């Protein structure tokens, strides 16, 4: 069993919610190399990369899986918004259960199925995180009257516009939950003693308050300006600089490996060992006789060996390896 210590760097899971029109999509677009899953058409006026608008729940899952398998396509995946994504999840859940509405499953069952299906999305988003890509989920905010069961009185509280089954799960999943809102100031007239609100500065709350949910693990102030610059250092400190010596992309490695494997399959099928093949290649003047198959250009193998195998095979089998002068040796 292995025990480690210290800070573990990695991509961030961010949830950002706030009232309609405050600028959640614009804020999210400032994240490194973003690509959007735009569930409600909120990025039409933004110059950003986006997947085709999802028409069904499966479209969202497919887009997430694509990013997880192709981590070079972006550095941040944004689901904008989670509450509209949940509507597609509800529709999917109902269709799968052959019912018209989520309540038709029976008491509580529909919401349990919904929670399970949305959890599937979060699990797939974890795969995106594991590949080194940040994930941002935006959501609309709604206000509801909240009553403490053991205290008298009630107060208004901001919450994400999600069902009571999905919202807590999304908050728990996230590393950072940010609540954006307009901060107003109440001033009192010295003469009339009347009060009025003014201001409307956009701010972002980063820690829990009885009137909203928020959290962070990076020591942010309780309230900061609604500006990506406030969290930029936290988000981008874990982004690695490109490695000029890094291995070829997996797609290229896969293609090359397939070519080498295909050649060795042909060699085994027609009983041509590596010595005979490399000598035949050398006699053709393509490579030195002491070069190994792994030294060959995959394009050469594909075109000149695999592509002309029948003719090359006959030539190679006719060679008398014991009576050859070897003019091509490195």
Image: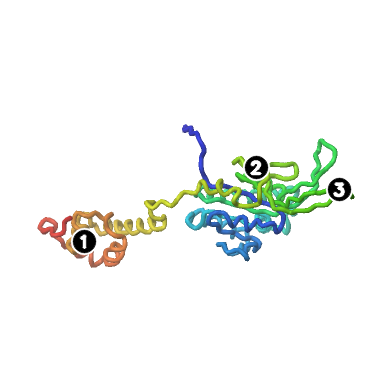
Report the number of discs: 3
Q: Which residue is mark 3?
A: 190
Identity of the residue furthest to the front in this view: 191
Q: Earlier in the sequence, mark 3 or mark 2?
A: 3
Using the numbered discs, state the Cα–Cα distance from disc 3 to disc 2 in whole angstroms. Answer: 33 Å
The residue depicted at 55 percent of the width and 50 percent of the height is: 134
Q: Is residue 206 left or right of residue 187?
A: left
Quick one: SS at disc 3?
loop
Graded by Cα atoms within 10 Å as few (under 14), some (14 to 19) or many (20 or more), the crowding at tag 1 reads many
Q: Are marks 2 and 1 in contact (CB under 8 Å)?
A: no
Rendered position, 222 above or below 330: above
Give the position of the C terminus as an image quadrant: bottom left
Q: Is residue 126 left or right of residue 20?
A: left
Closer-to-camera residue (255/208) = 208
**Residue 281, numbered label:** 1
Looking at the image, tell me whether mark 1 or mark 3 is earlier in sequence order: 3
Residue 82: image x %, image y %?
65, 54
Q: Element under label 1? A: helix
- The mark nearer the N terminus, 2 or 1, is 2
Give the labeled residue for mark 2. Answer: 221
């Amino acid at each position: 069993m292995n025990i480690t210590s210290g800070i573990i760097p990695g991509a961030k899971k961010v949830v950002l919610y706030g009232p309609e029109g405050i600028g959640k999509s614009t804020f999210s677009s400032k994240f490194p190399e973003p690509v959007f899953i735009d569930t409600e058409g909120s990025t039409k006026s933004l110059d950003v990369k986006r997947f085709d608008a999802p028409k069904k729940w499966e479209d969202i899952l497919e887009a997430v899986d694509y990013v997880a398998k192709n981590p070079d396509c972006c550095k941040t995946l944004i689901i904008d918004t989670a509450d509209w994504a949940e509507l597609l999840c509800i529709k999917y859940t109902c269709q799968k259960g052959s019912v018209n509405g989520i309540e038709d499953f029976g008491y509580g069952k529909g919401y349990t199925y919904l929670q399970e299906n949305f959890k599937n999305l979060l699990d797939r988003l974890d795969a995106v995180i594991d590949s080194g890509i940040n994930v941002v989920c935006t959501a609309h905010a709604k206000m509801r009257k909240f009553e403490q069961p053991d205290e008298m009185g009630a107060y208004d509280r901001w919450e994400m516009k999600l069902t009571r089954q999905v919202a807590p799960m999304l908050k728990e999943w996230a590393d950072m939950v940010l609540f954006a809102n307009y901060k107003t100031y109440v001033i009192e007239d010295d003469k009339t003693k009347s009060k009025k609100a003014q201001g409307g500065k956009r701010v972002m709350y980063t820690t829990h308050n009885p009137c909203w949910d928020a959290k962070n693990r990076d020591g942010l102030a309780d309230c900061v300006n609604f500006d990506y610059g406030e969290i930029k250092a936290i988000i981008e400190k874990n982004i690695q600089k490109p490695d000029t010596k890094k291995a070829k992309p997996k797609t290229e490695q896969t293609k090359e490996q397939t070519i080498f494997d295909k050649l060795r399959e042909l060699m085994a099928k027609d009983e041509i060992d590596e010595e005979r093949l490399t000598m035949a290649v050398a006699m053709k003047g393509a490579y030195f006789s002491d070069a190994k198959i792994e030294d060959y250009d995959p394009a050469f193998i594909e075109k000149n060996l695999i592509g002309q195998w029948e003719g090359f095979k006959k030539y190679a089998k006719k060679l008398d390896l014991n009576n050859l002068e070897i003019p091509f040796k490195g």
